[in-house]
Image (cartoon, rainbow, N blue to C red):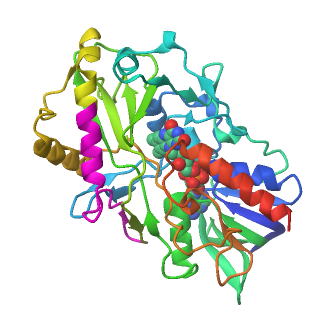
Amino acid sequence: MIDHRCRTVVVGAGVAGCALASRISRTDEVVLIEAGPRVGGAEVPVDVHAALTTPGLRWPGVSARRVAGGPMVEYPMARGVGGGSLVNGLVVDRAVEPLVAEEVGSSEFGPVDRALVAGLGARPVRLSRRRGARYAVSEADLGRVDLRAGAFVRGVVTEESRVAGVEIDSDGGGTVVEADRVVLAAGAFGSPRLLQAARLGGPTVGFGLQDHPSVVVPLAGTGAFDGLVSGAVARFNGVEVLALNRLPDGQSGIAVALLDPASRGRVTADEIDLNLLDDDTDDLARLTAGVISVLERLGDALRTEDLTIGDAVPPRGDPAAVSEWVWSEVANSAPAYTHAAASCSVGVVDARHRVGGVDGLFVVDASTLPAVPTGSSMTAIIDQVELVARGWSSR
Ligand SMILES: Cc1cc2nc3c(=O)[nH]c(=O)nc-3n(C[C@H](O)[C@H](O)[C@H](O)COP(=O)(O)OP(=O)(O)OC[C@H]3O[C@@H](n4cnc5c(N)ncnc54)[C@H](O)[C@@H]3O)c2cc1C
């Protein structure tokens, strides 16, 4: 069956896909195809834990090997119009259209925020929320976009060395949506896998994958807190330290993440291998040093809030034990930071984001960032979309 002809098909209505489709639709015809549902961002709680358990907004069964030799651990991967911005922490560096940036007020701080401000000079985070509600990237102007939610793209269709469209699942088979230009925006796992399935993009597709190695230092002593999960963040010595006033189990903690890891992993059809602590890098040593300095600097400020470091964390005076604990947490625990990126960063696209060897095929999303961003991923991705779209329109 042949569907209608269009100029551009964007695959995946996530952070990149919504922003890009909106931008292109000012001048061109665009079809935006998303496997997940269309849900208003404001219908999803701001609270990241509650958002992640909203039915239908996560791909089932996604897991990743976090360190070489470690187990597969569940990895939250969003689906739906808005992609990651439907379920994520909403932290942005600044307002980047369509997202907004509202600084958290100190009256909203929870106990861990206050401890981080007092002990580490942490600053309030900026959230993409409006009137207390989640403000997702699906707020982009999609009025001129032919949006098809609930449609899974099976593959890219090519004719000789040109892209011809994409094939979507439909009753009893596939439907081809024809296009002059196809842009993959299916995220750090989805885009390389679509290229691999079509044998496009060369042998390095999937290589270069990065995420932030991170741990949650558990805290004891807090009572139930029902305010913001995270209101304050600090950065020093190459780590980001984020308050977690509430964890899914009702406890609290402090997330410590390495901002600029050197480790690189790989996405294949069968496995996501994050390789977060490559032995050939000093990522484990740097993350351990960050954790130790958090333990050293926070003691008094935590006591003021009646908080203490959880028993599971070795004493800071025993760096070898802290390093072992950090490795084990990174390897085995559900991730504190989930900013997978850069899996199409190694020789897959050129400066205009064209995929080599096939005319009319592009990739623009977290996978084409050169590395995992040191700031907000959403800000970096939307900046990238704007740059690429400007380059295309100046041809
Ligand atoms: C729990 C969590 C917390 C986070 N917190 C923050 C934060 O506070 N701040 C921040 O800046 N970033 C945060 N991030 C990261 C951020 O959300 C991602 O970096 C961003 O969403 C990636 O954008 P993307 O466009 O590359 O992919 P996505 O936003 O993931 O979009 C990809 C879309 O493609 C769709 N898709 C995939 N395959 C197909 C297919 N075959 N057919 C059709 N559709 C398909 C998916 O359903 C999805 O909607 C967080 C992420 C998570 C999971």
166 sits left or right of 111 in the view:
right
Residue 295 image-quadrant placement = top left
Q: Quadrant of the N terminus?
A: bottom right
Q: Is residue 286 magenta?
A: yes
Across and down, in percent, residue 99 comes to 67, 36
Q: Residue at position x 32%, y 61% from top?
A: 275
Q: Which residues are magenta?
A: 269-293
Horizontally, is 203 left or right of 82 in the view?
left
Which residue is located at x 42 percent, y 53 percent?
211
Q: Quadrant of residue 70?
A: bottom left
The one nearer the camera, 87 or 284, is 284
Residue 388 visible here: yes
Q: Is 330 above or below relative to 304?
A: below
Q: Position of residue 162 (x, y in %)?
A: 73, 83
Residue farthest to the right, as pictured: 27
Query: Total marks drawn?
Result: 0
Residue furthest toward the front?
Answer: 237
Q: Where is residue 366 drawn, in percent x and y?
A: 56, 56
Left-right relation of 360 to 59: right
Q: Residue placed at 85% from the left, 68% from the top?
A: 395
The reply to whether residue 87 is visible in this rendering is: no
Asked if the magenta segment contains residue 243, the reply would be: no
Of 139 and 147, the residue lying toward us: 139
In the image, what residue occupies the spot 66% across and 41% down? 137
Q: Residue furthest bottom?
A: 160
Q: In this picture, is 159 found above or below 141? A: below
Relative to 60, residue 192 above or below: below
Q: Looking at the picture, how far across and down is residue 387, in whole percent?
A: 73, 56
